[in-house]
Amino acid sequence: MQRFVWPLVLFFASPLAAQETCSRAICQVPHDSLNFTKLIDFDDVMSSIGIGSRIDDVLVKDGAVFGERFAGQQRKASGDYDVISGAPLLPLTILDGGPGQTLGAMHLPGTIVLHGHGHRTYPRVEAIGEGSVAVLFDRDQPALSFDIRGGEQGYASVQFIRRNGTVIDTLTLGPLAEDSFGFMRQDMEPDIAGFLLLNTDPQGVALDNLRFESFDLMG
């Protein structure tokens, strides 16, 4: 990740309107159309300037755990990027990716962001932001939102997973620039146990401002 641009405008006017036009199990909605009571912003994670720091273990925060993948899944590579395959084992458990291949924290103006380290291994630039990020919530969620930092017109995928390990839906995001994304379960069913974020952006991407828990609709 080398340069950043300001957020783009989202497509939908309201979450209810989005659901009316969305037949998927997970619908993309405006991030600012939802209110949440929990925010994970990573600003208390130890980091450094430049390529940032490395996090070799899973990262435990209030309400969620972060790592590379779920237990039972396998990591492969496509170029510089992580590719995760296989079904999670039960109970759902977050795994690290090994030294220099798990997570990283990076200083950006006014914030600290979290990204995955790819198989090229930290501190190589080719690893920064190219790795997967897996998130497991303490409680199942009907909706969530997060910010993508970075983005050079590449793509990301978000795989949403139930507590029983089955996939609810997988959404493709892009072409990417810096943006905020909201997601709502069809009929607001509270069964999102976690998600897996992957990307193929030329400079990689980072995650910031994960919002979840006890939301209501605005407007």
Image: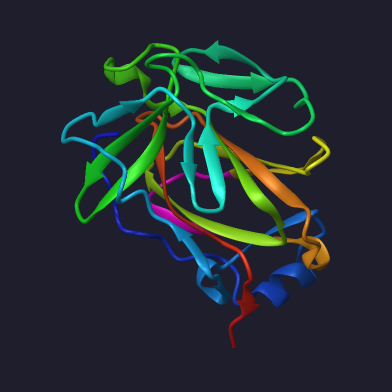
Q: Is residue 178 magenta?
A: yes
Question: Residue placed at 30% from the left, 49% from the top?
Answer: 44
Question: Residue placed at 32% from the left, 17% from the top?
Answer: 122
Judged from this view, the residue extending furthest toward the left is: 49
x and y percentages locating residue 180 in the rendered image: 46, 58
Judged from this view, the residue extending furthest toward the bottom is: 219
x and y percentages locating residue 159 in the rendered image: 67, 39
Residue 39 is left or right of residue 140, and the answer is: left
Q: Quadrant of the N terminus?
A: top left
Question: Residue placed at 28% from the left, 20% from the top?
Answer: 125
Query: Considering depth in this image, is 61 or 22 the residue closer to the camera?
Result: 61
Question: Residue placed at 66% from the left, 61% from the top?
Answer: 143
x and y percentages locating residue 48 in the rendered image: 18, 35
Colour convention: rainbow
Q: Is residue 36 visible?
A: yes
Q: Which residues are magenta?
A: 173-182
Q: Is residue 37 magenta?
A: no
**Residue 170: quadrant of the picture:** top right
Query: Considering depth in this image, is 11 or 64 the residue closer to the camera?
Result: 64
Q: Quadrant of the C terminus?
A: bottom right
x and y percentages locating residue 70 in the rendered image: 65, 28
- Count the marks: 0
Residue 199 is left or right of residue 184, and the answer is: left
In this view, 123 is above or below 61 = above
Residue 174 is left or right of residue 142, and the answer is: left
Query: Considering depth in this image, is 46 or 196 the residue closer to the camera?
Result: 46
Q: Is residue 158 visible?
A: no
In this view, 176 is above or below 186 = above
